[in-house]
Amino acid sequence: MALTADQQREISDLLKQQIRRKLTDYNPETNNMPFHIRLLGRDRMAIFSFVQSINTTLGTSVFEQVAVIIAKPYFKIAISQYKDFNNTISENSHQAIQNIIDNLKGAIVEPNKPFETREILKISQTGIIKKIKKPRIDLFLETHDGDEYYIDLKTVKANRGEIIGFKRTLLEWVAIRGAQDPACKIHTELAIPYNPYEPNPYDRWTFKGMFDIKNELKVADEFWNFLGGSNTYNDLLNVFEQVGLQLKPEIDEKFKSFNH
C-alpha cells in the first residue's frame, strides 16, 4: 500500500492552497527587526519569517489534515481535531494516573502502556466522577475491528518536563474514555511527523523511562506508514517536493520585492 493518485492530488491541492494563502496574506513589516535586516538583508529576513509561518501552519493544521486524507481508505473513521469526546474523569483514575507517573519518574517500574491502560480502565467508573475541560484530539482513528486511536501530534524537540506532561495527557485520555465505556479498545499515542535529527536516528532516549516506545510513540515513517501502509512516508515526501518545485516561481516572485 502507498498513496493513490487521488490521495497525492488531494494532498498536493491542500499544500498549494495553504502556501498560496500564506503568500497572499504575508506581510513581514509587522515584525520590525532593524539590526537583523541590516546584518542579513531584508529579503533573507522576509524568507526566514515566511518559513517560520509555514512551519507553524504545518504543525498546527496541515499534518493533521494530511493524516486524515491518508488514513480514510484504511480506517472506519478518521477525523482531525476530534471533538466528540467525553469530559468526565473518575477521582480513582486520576489517582491511579498520578501513581503511574510517580513510579515512572522514580524508575520503580518500566513503562508498559497496555498494562497501564488496563489498570486505569478497571477503575475508570469508580469513585467520584468529575467534569473537566474537554480535551482536543489532533487525530482520531477507529479501525473496522473497533480499536480506537487517539493521537497527539508534536513537532517539537521535547524536554523532560514536557514529556511527563505528554505522558499524563495520554493516560488521562484513557481515563476519560473509560468513564464512558471501560470496555473500549483504546490506544493513546504521540506522533512526530518527521525526525528533526535526520539522517541520524530519532533521539528516543529522551522518552525512555516515561514512554512505552513500542506502544506510545510513532516517529516519521512509523507514523505515516501506520496510516497508509508501506512506502507512504516516501510517497508523501515526494508530494511535498513536487509542490515545492511547482510553487518555486511564485515564491521567488513574491520575495523579489524585499530585495530593496
Image: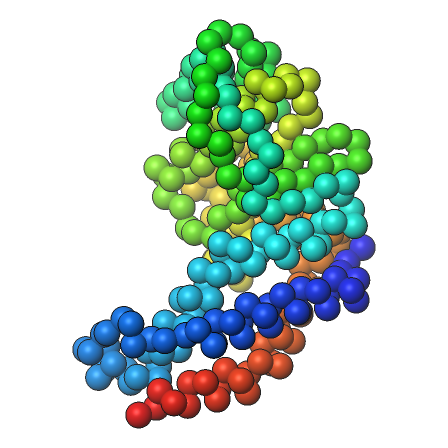
Residue 235 at x, y = what percent?
70, 64
For residue 145, above or below residue 226? above
- Residue at x-position 48% and y-position 86%: 252
Instruction: Examine the rendering and report whether any part of residue 107 can be seen.
Output: no
Q: Quadrant of the N terminus?
A: bottom right
Q: Is residue 256 left or right of residue 33?
A: right
Which quadrant holds residue 12?
A: bottom right
Q: Where does residue 171 sit, x and y in percent of width and height?
A: 51, 27
Image spot of residue 2 (x, y percent): 77, 58
Q: Viewer-proximal residue, 215 or 60?
A: 60
Residue 65: which quarter of the image? bottom right
Residue in the image at 75% along x and 30% along y: 146
Position of 115 with respect to 133 (left or right) is right
Q: Residue at x 49, y 48 (%)?
A: 154
- Residue 186 visible, this angle: yes
The residue positioned 42% from the left and 38% from the top of the image is 163
Quarter of the rendering containing residue 7 = bottom right
Number of numbered callouts drawn: 0
Q: Quadrant of the C terminus?
A: bottom left
Q: Is residue 21 above or below residue 76?
A: below
